[in-house]
Amino acid sequence: MTDSAFTVAEYRRRVANVQDAMAAADLDVLLAHSMASVCYLTGLESFAVHKYWLAAVPRSGDPILLVQGFESLNASIGCWITDVVTYDLQADHVTATAELLSDRGFDGGRIGIELGPLTSLTPHDYVRLGELLPRASFTDAAPLISRVRAVKSAAEIDYMRQAAALSSVGMQAAIDTVAAGKTDNEVAAVAYGTMIAGGSEYFCYQPIVTVGRRSGIPHSTFQRVEIKPGDAVFMELGACIRRYSSPIMRTVFVGRPPDQVRRMIDACIASVDKLIEHIRPGIVAGDLARQAETQLATVIEKVIWHGSYCYSVGLGFPPTWADCPEINVTVDSEKVLQAGMVFHCSTSLRDPGRCGTTCSETVAVTETGCEVLTSLPREVIVL
């Protein structure tokens, strides 16, 4: 194994945790189909997330990797397991999966499958796999893997510290570039170049830079728009180290913001401050969200707010750095925070077609509270 992100002991610990959860769910084998989960369990990386990937985890023993022969060379770079099964480039991957499971004696067992929009197993594939293995029973095991991935090791958090340092440097470079007459593309290019030159890998999300009235439109980004006096510049960046991302969000104002907009950005900052003040192991996510919600009372009825104060981040591939969708800090969540969880703590308020404001940090839950991994002042930035 060369260029491995972690030790073999680290990977074995992850697999053992998954196998403990499998035993509790009475599963004979678990099929991980997302590139992120395959990487988490085996160390294999590829930007070809559109391909079919499978890490099969038995109740005991090491995982089995099933990949196209063309893609199997990636296993020689960072993959720790030796049981690699391949199939021809033009062969049918569902048939190859059914044959693997039959050959290993799982064709009549309880099979957990990682289902969801980010996996390489399509609904059509899932139906066909059931037809090819009529004696097997299937269940959705995505939450099982997600719960294990949600709690990071010290080594994982160290990569996230490195990514956070690059995200922060990239954001500062972007802030320094913002000026009337510049374009959103110019700001994004500086942020991108700074993070890549500093050592970041390719991103899960490309840099988000949206200007003026477009900043009030969720998930708009750079499109050759000139920055003008009076504009807000809404930015979200996330550098990546060994596939671990640490996002940060900031807003820059070109000129003094109007009173309503100033209340919006003040509320964003105060909400994130309140989150950081109260994050600790043992706190219920809903209670944490209600603490942050108190800071939005003066503006919430007049703006768009998606209602999620924090979400879990960690190992990821495009199109997202979010790693555990059910670990989400909202007012109705009953999830309990644990040491080792890492969150993107963000508040973004948008007045559609007029202005958007935001502030965020990447924060790790420690044994006694939390550690803010990103490192820029949380303040109103006016040029």
Image: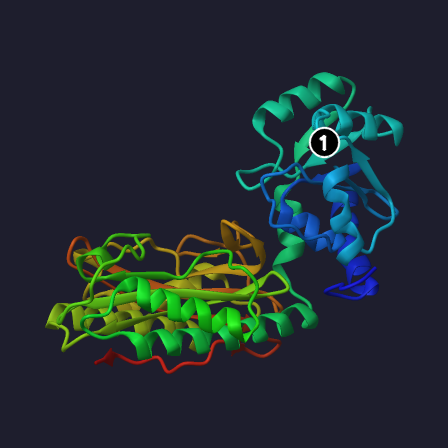
Q: Residue at x 64, y 64 (%)?
A: 242
Q: Residue at x 19, y 70 (%)?
A: 181
Q: Which residue is mark 1?
A: 89
- Image coords of residue 24 (percent x, y): 76, 44
When the figure is inspected, residue 34 is found, relative to residue 310, above or below; the finding is above
Left or right: residue 250 versus residue 280 is left
Residue, far left: 258
Q: Secondary structure at mark 1?
A: loop
What is the number of callouts on the image?
A: 1
Residue 373 in view in this figure: no
Please state which of residues 73 and 151 is positioned toward the viewer in this rendering.
73
Q: Split into 4 quadrants, where in the image is the N terminus?
A: bottom right
Residue 307 sits in quarter = bottom left
- Image coords of residue 284 (percent x, y): 50, 62
* Label 1 environment density (alpha carbons within 10 Å; few <14, some 14–19, many ≥20): few
Residue 229 in view in this figure: yes
When the figure is inspected, residue 11 is found, relative to residue 145, above or below; the finding is below
Residue 189 sits in quarter = bottom left
- Image coords of residue 50 (percent x, y): 58, 39
Please state which of residues 134 and 20 is positioned toward the viewer in this rendering.
134
Left or right: residue 111 versus residue 163 is right
Q: Split into 4 quadrants, where in the image is the C terminus?
A: bottom left
Three-letter amino acid code of the residue under disc 1? Leu
- Image coords of residue 115 (percent x, y): 60, 36
The colour scheme used to paint the residues is: rainbow
When the figure is inspected, residue 119 is found, relative to residue 364, above or below; the finding is above
Left or right: residue 28 versus residue 124 is right
